[in-house]
């Protein structure tokens, strides 16, 4: 068998696919479609325009686009990298302070933007332009003639973390890191079971970047929903005969709580993937019932760890686990001394990068805490049971120390999600004068506020006494960031607001 060398960059992959199938659609976003030939030609024209503007090798360029601008964003992302720059994704949903921090921290030379315009508070020395204007003003061949392919070892992307516990941190990735796992062998394209795949992830998130790579690498056409609503999302599944559906827990919960899937033809869906945060086990079970022909998969990774990823295949017969890892080669669970934990015992979770790992921007002290050679500390506590199923117990920072006990907020949330009248829930610790901390929960009811006494009785069958929420607050929604992660610092403020007379 002839072995085909992998691409050294996403640009090499784009050039390859455009040469083979220039008219094949790679990405759809609302009424807009982008085929491989147009993607290559526009990215090349943009690269020439950026070089004419004076972009130097290694210059970071911010990319501010919204969820209706995925096709333009895809062009801008590849054009910056082809010109030798570093792509810095910037969602237009970012708060002005967060956007300003990213532009300053990454030292952006300029910002390319879509219809929403550049971010506010842009420093005077940072230029701003639309990709279309830069393409139009370019001189040079549109198919990439005269543009060398990027050096695989050069930095290609600065992606910022979600900032759920503070300011977002920049994570640097090389071209080789981004293209790892991609192929130039047409016989080995991923998602061959799907004609299309569907997602609604925001630009600027690790999940969104994974979907962009999927558009370049997989056999399926990517469909990016301009905005997530259950009815629109369900309609897109049927309209595009979607084979692979990608969600985050928040959108999975909202989709299942609606009637959007009723009377829809979902028979084409063979894969439902969840990422970005732990999928509550009752939600995973309901997904398997809603999509009976699909495998439910939890993708376990992070902005820092990618492309390291554990694929957890959910098993309805083992609903207490997000799934059994497809492989254990790149997973390690360690005890407090850094030694491999005994099977069944909890410990810190580490993933091993299969290629050059990522690193934080200008934070060597934090690097040593998270990156150890090719191993990346995930910040989670978990264990592997005797049957090889992974159990995610909690984020290290979220574990509640109550008296002599350690309480998993994930376990509390799973119990709350099992209640038929609860649509969403989040647990966290609050101070206690004797125990140090106790459990509190913010709950989103489905139809009116549940009886608290009956809810506690329900939880008594699923939780130990020290795991029971001491305070329960009912709200219409949970505070989440643009990637769907619950902002637990905001939950504390909700309780503070309730206590204020």
Image (cartoon, helix red, strand yellow):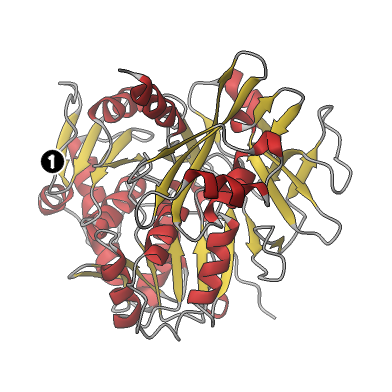
Instruction: Give left or right: position of 239 versus 293.
Output: left
Say if 300 sits above or below 87 in the image. Answer: below
State how many labels appear: 1
The image shows residue 81 at horizontal and vertical percentages of 36, 47
Q: Residues within 10 Å of mark 1 (few under 14, many from 20)?
A: some
Residue 28 visible, this angle: no
Residue at disc 1, secondary structure: loop
Res 325 → quadrant? bottom right
Residue 321 in sight from this viewpoint? yes
- Quadrant assignment, res 447: bottom left
Find disc 1 in the rendering and name its residue.
117
Of 77 and 326, nearer the camera is 326
Q: Position of residue 316 (x, y in %)?
A: 66, 70
Q: Is residue 243 above or below residue 114?
A: below
Front one among 106 and 57: 106
Q: Is residue 318 above or below residue 363?
A: below
Residue 13: image quadrant is bottom left
Q: Position of residue 295 (x, y in %)?
A: 58, 74
Percent from the top left, x then y, of residue 134? Answer: 15, 47
Give the camera-side residue of 160 and 347.
347
Which residue lies most toward the right here? 342
Q: Between residue 38 and residue 415, name the one nearer to us.
A: 415
Asked whether, in this view, residue 210 is left or right of residue 339, the answer is left
Tell me which residue sits at (23%, 29%) in the image: 96
| Residue at position x 82%, y 54% in the image | 385
The furthest residue to the top: 433
Quadrant of the frame with the C terminus: top left
- For the N terminus, the image quarter is bottom right
């Amino acid at each position: 068998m002839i072995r085909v060398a992998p691409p050294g960059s996403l640009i090499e992959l784009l050039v390859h696919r455009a040469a083979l199938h220039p008219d094949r659609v790679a990405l759809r976003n609302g009424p807009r479609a982008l085929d491989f030939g147009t993607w290559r030609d526009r990215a090349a024209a943009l690269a020439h325009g950026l070089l004419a503007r004076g972009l130097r090798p290694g210059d970071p360029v911010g990319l501010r686009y919204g969820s209706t601008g995925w096709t333009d964003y895809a062009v801008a992302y590849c054009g910056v990298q082809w010109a030798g720059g570093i792509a810095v994704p910037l969602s237009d949903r970012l708060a002005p302070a967060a956007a300003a921090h990213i532009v300053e921290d990454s030292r952006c030379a300029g910002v390319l933007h879509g219809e929403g315009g550049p971010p506010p508070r842009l420093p005077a020395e940072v230029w701003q332009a639309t990709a279309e204007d830069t393409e139009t003003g370019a001189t040079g061949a549109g198919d990439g003639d005269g543009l060398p392919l990027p050096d695989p070892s050069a930095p290609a992307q600065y992606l910022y973390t979600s900032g759920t516990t503070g300011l977002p941190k920049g994570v640097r990735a090389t071209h080789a890191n981004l293209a790892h796992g991609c192929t130039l062998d047409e016989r080995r394209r991923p998602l061959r079971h799907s004609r299309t795949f569907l997602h609604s992830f925001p630009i600027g998130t690790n999940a969104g970047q994974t979907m962009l790579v999927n558009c370049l690498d997989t056999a399926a056409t990517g469909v990016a929903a301009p905005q997530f609503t259950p009815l629109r999302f369900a309609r897109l599944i049927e309209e595009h005969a979607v084979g692979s559906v990608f969600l985050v827990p928040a959108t999975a919960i909202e989709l299942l709580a609606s009637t959007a899937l009723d009377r829809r033809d979902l028979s084409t869906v063979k894969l439902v993937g969840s990422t970005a945060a732990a999928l509550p086990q009752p939600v995973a079970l309901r997904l398997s019932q809603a999509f009976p022909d699909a495998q439910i998969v939890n993708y376990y990774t992070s902005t820092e760890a990618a492309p390291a990823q554990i694929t957890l295949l959910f098993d309805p017969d083992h609903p207490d686990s997000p799934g059994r890892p497809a492989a254990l080669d790149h997973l390690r669970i360690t005890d407090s001394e850094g030694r491999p934990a005994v099977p069944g015992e909890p410990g810190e979770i580490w993933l091993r990068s299969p290629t050059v790992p990522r690193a934080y921007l200008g934070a060597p002290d934090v690097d040593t805490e998270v990156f150890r050679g090719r191993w990346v500390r995930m910040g989670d506590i978990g264990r592997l049971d005797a049957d090889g199923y992974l159990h995610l117990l909690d984020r290290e920072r979220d574990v509640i120390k109550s008296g002599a006990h350690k309480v998993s907020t994930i376990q509390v949330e799973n119990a709350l999600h099992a209640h038929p009248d609860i649509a969403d829930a989040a647990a966290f610790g609050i101070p206690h004068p004797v125990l140090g901390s106790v459990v509190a929960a913010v709950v989103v009811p489905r139809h009116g506020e549940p009886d608290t006494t009956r809810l506690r009785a329900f939880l008594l069958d699923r939780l130990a006494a020290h795991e029971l929420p001491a305070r329960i607050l009912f709200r219409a929604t949970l505070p989440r960031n643009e990637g769907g992660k619950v902002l637990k610092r905001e939950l504390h403020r909700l309780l503070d607001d309730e206590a204020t007379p």
